[in-house]
Image (cartoon, rainbow, N blue to C red):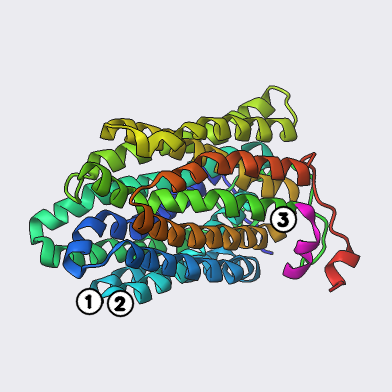
Amino acid sequence: METLQRPATSNFRWVICALLFVATTINYVDRTVIAVLEPDLRRIIQWDDRQWSYITASFMLAYAIGFLFSGWMMDKLGTRLGFTISLVVWSFAAAAHALAHNVWGFMIARFALGLGESGNFPACIKTVAEWFPKRERALATGIFNAGTNVGATISPFLVPIILHQYGDENGWRIAFVATGLVGLLWVVFWWPIYRRPQEHRRVSAQELAYIESDPADPPVRVPWNTLLNHRPTWAFAIAKFLTDSVWWFYLFWFPPFMDAEFDINTKQIMWPMMTVYIMADVGSVLGGWQSSWLIGRGWSINAARKTAMLTYALCIVPVAAAPLVDHKWWAVFLIGVAAASHQGFSANLFTLVSDVFPRRAVGSIIGIGGFAGAIGGFILTLSTGWLKQSTGNYVAPFAIAATAYLVALTIVHVLIPRVEPVIITEHDSTRG
C-alpha cells in the first residue's frame, strides 16, 4: 500500500456515519411512501386488507431472500461497491411503483424494492465495525439507525404536498418517482468519499489508532455456513425474527390502523405518523447512548447491552392497549413509545453482533438476522391482514407486539449468557 499523507488530527469516522444515516433515511422514505398512500390507493386500486397484506408480504419475502445474499455480498465485494449496487437497484425499483396499475403490479414492484433494500443494514453494520471501536459502535449504530425514523417522518410530510400539487389520481405516481430516484444522488457522494480507514487520506494516524484500538481479529477466513455452528448467531436470528416483525407491523399497518380506527386519511396522517417516528428517532440515539454511557462508567459490555435491552422491552408492553383507547393521540403516544423502545432495543441488538463476531463476519451475521427478521415480518403482516379481515380489529397483533421483546431478550440471554468474542478457528473455517 502506498504511504498516505494523513492530516494531523481528524474525526472522519463521523462523516462516514453521516453518510450511513442519509442512506438509511432514503431507504425508509422509499419503503414507507406506499404506507402513507395506502388509504388513497385502497380507494383508487380497490384492494382490501388481505390484498394489502399480500403487497407488503411481497416486499418482506424479497427482503428476506435478499438478506441471504446481501450480507455475503458486503463481505465479498466490500461496502463501497456492495452498497452502491444496493442503492442503484432499490432506487429504480422504488420509482417503478409508478408503473403499477393493480395489486399484482404493486406486488412485483415491492418484491424488486425488497431485494435492493436488503443491502442497507448489512452494509451499515459492517461499515460501523470497520470505522468504530467497540466503545462507540452502539452510538454510531443508534445514529445511523435514526435514519429509519427520519425517513418515515419525511414520507408523511412530503407525500401530501405532492398530492396537493398534482392531485390524487396522478400525484401518487409522481411521489414514487420523485422519492425513488433520490438514492442515486447519494451514490454520487458515497463512491468518491468511501474507503476503509486504513486506506483513507483524511484519517489521521491518531484517529486510525483509536479505530484500531480493540484487539485485532484473528486472520481466519469465515465461510457463511460455519457461522450457524455458533449459538450467538441463533440468538441474533431468533431475536430479529421476533422483534423485526413488530417493526414491520408498525411500518406498514399504522396508516391503515389509523384510517380504520380513527378515520385518518393520507392527508391527515402527517402529524400522527411524524410524532411516532420522531419519538422513535429519540429512542434510537438514546438506546445507543445508554449502553455506551454505562460502559464508560465501568459496566461490562454484557451488563450494559442487556440492561438497555431490558429497559426498552419493558417500555413496549403498554402498546397492547393501543387498539382499545378512545382517542387517536393516546394510540399515537402508545405506539410512539413502543417504536422508540424498539429502536433502542434494536441498536443494542445490532451492536451485539460486532461485540461478539470478528469484523469480517459481521455482514454475513447481519444478513442471517435480517433474513430471519424479514421472515417474521412476512408472517406477521400476512397474519394481520387475515386477523383484521376476520375479527374486524387489531387486538391480536398489538398483543404480539407487546410481548415479543421480553421473549427475545430471554432467548438472547439463554444463548449468550456472557457477551464475549466468538473464537473462530481454522478448523471452524474449513469444516462443513
What is the secondary structure assignment of the residue under circle 3?
helix
In magenta, the rendered stretch is 224-231
Say above or below: 168 vs 395: below
Q: Please tell me in which quadrant of the rendered image residue 169 appears.
A: bottom left
Residue where numbered disc 3 is placed? 234
Q: Please tell me in which quadrant of the rendered image residue 58 appears.
A: bottom left
Q: How many angstroms separate mark 2 from mark 3 (CA)?
A: 36 Å
Amino acid type assigned to the residue bearing label 2 in the image: Gly
Residue 401 seen from this side: yes
Q: Residue at x 47, y 64 (%)?
A: 60
What is the secondary structure assignment of the residue under circle 1?
loop
Q: Is residue 106 left or right of residue 162?
A: right
Residue lying farthest to the right in this orientation: 427
Neighbor class of circle 1 (other Cα within 10 Å; few <14, some 14-19, many 20+) is: few
The disc at residue 105 is 2
Q: Residue at x 38, y 37 (%)?
A: 322
Amino acid type assigned to the residue bearing label 3 in the image: Trp
Where, quadrant-wise, is the C terminus in this rendering? bottom right
Amino acid type assigned to the residue bearing label 1 in the image: His
Where, quadrant-wise, is the N terminus in this rendering? bottom right
Residue where numbered disc 1 is placed? 101
Give coordinates of residue 35: x percent, y percent.
31, 56
Tell me the chief SS of the magenta region. helix
What is the secondary structure assignment of the residue under circle 2?
helix
Q: Residue at x 40, y 69 (%)?
A: 113
Q: Are marks 2 and 1 in contact (CB under 8 Å)?
A: yes
Q: Please tell me in which quadrant of the rendered image residue 228 appears.
A: bottom right
Q: Are marks 2 and 3 in contact (CB under 8 Å)?
A: no
